[in-house]
Image: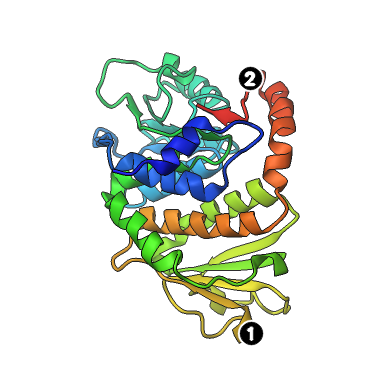
Amino acid sequence: MEEKNIELLKSFNIENLPSLDVAVLGALELFQGKELPKLELGVYKHPLVVGSGNAEATGRIIFENIDAVFASESNYEEKLKDIPSIDGVIIISASGEKHALIVAKCVKEYNKHITLITNTPYSSTHDELDHEHSYDEYIFPKNREPYTYNTSTYMGMILGKTHEDPLSIQNFIKENIDTQVMPDFSKYDKYFLIVPPKFSGIIRMLEVKFIELFGRRIARDVETSEYMKHAVTVVPSDELFISFGDENKNWGGVGNRLYIPLPTNADYGAMMAIGYYVVAQIQKSHKQYFKENIAEYVEEVSKIFGQEIKAIVD
């Protein structure tokens, strides 16, 4: 098995941070050789699933077919107070630090059982768990990546649910995305991503990735092809419409449309990988806002959380 991108992820430093596509391909390489934990959470009838940022979105994807309540770091305690039927809390956090620890300490005050789904053994949140049951903690494999990329982390959790073949996804990218003639992304500072309705759960993940990589320097919207029928294009704009899985025949001028295919019977793992891969092509075509600012950012955010946040997550 080729591990070209994993080797790049093992060796980069703050001076030569990889682009997002390296993290995508490295994750697909990783999961070809790693067995993923099997989530067995039938003990819960009505759990509260909590995560921050893309961890929250990942939770909604993983548990979309169960009777769960979903929350972020901003409203989880309100849910605990107002919904007495909640019989346990599932915390999703790649690091097991920052808000995950704050949430866990609060949940214990409500005498609710905690399950942690993470990528980090012996995190601070690990110390708040019972350690008496097989379902107390699930640790998924991950690659070394720049802070916030969180590609191998959440992709592993999603593949653990969908059971898609990472090699097939990798081959699809090589044969159907890399061979495609892409537009000059540097010409655009506004993008509209259109995803199939069955992948509505990916919207927040793509939005967050744009925010992390570009801040407000590049505008973006992400909606399903069904939601596009509502008033989201009343005001015309010189933006590139990128549609995944279904060809866009309605939105934007013909010259401002890009169609990205998805594998037959694609699930969320493929959607995430291909979506991030395309965002990476945009990243590589513009000024490197993320790479130029991440070191200073983690310095500031470390003060806010009162713990060291590193620009490179091992």
Q: Looking at the picture, which amino acid does disc 1 mark? A: Gly
In the rendered structure, the answer to whether residue 75 lies left or right of residue 215 reads: left
Q: Residue at x 68, y 73 (%)?
A: 239
- Look at the image and tell me whether residue 199 can be seen: yes
Looking at the image, is mark 1 or mark 2 earlier in the sequence? 1
- Measure how far apart labels 1 and 2 are at the Cα level: 47 Å
In the rendered structure, the answer to whether residue 141 lies left or right of residue 278 reads: left
Which of the two residues, 277 or 56, is positioned nearer the viewer here?
277
Residue 70 x, y percent position in the rendering: 46, 44
**Which residue, given by chain and number where applicable, does mark 1 sit on?**
253
Q: Is the residue marked by circle 1 packed among few (<14), some (14-19), or many (20+) residues within 10 Å?
A: few
Q: Residue at x 26, y 49 (%)?
A: 163
- Quarter-of-image position of residue 197: bottom left
Q: Secondary structure at mark 1?
A: loop
In the rendered structure, the answer to whether residue 299 lies left or right of residue 110 reads: right
Q: Residue at x 41, y 30 (%)?
A: 118
**Which residue, given by chain and number where applicable, does mark 2 sit on?**
308
Residue 256 x, y percent position in the rendering: 63, 79
In the rendered structure, the answer to whether residue 218 lies left or right of residue 271 reads: right
- Look at the image and tell me whether residue 69 can be seen: no
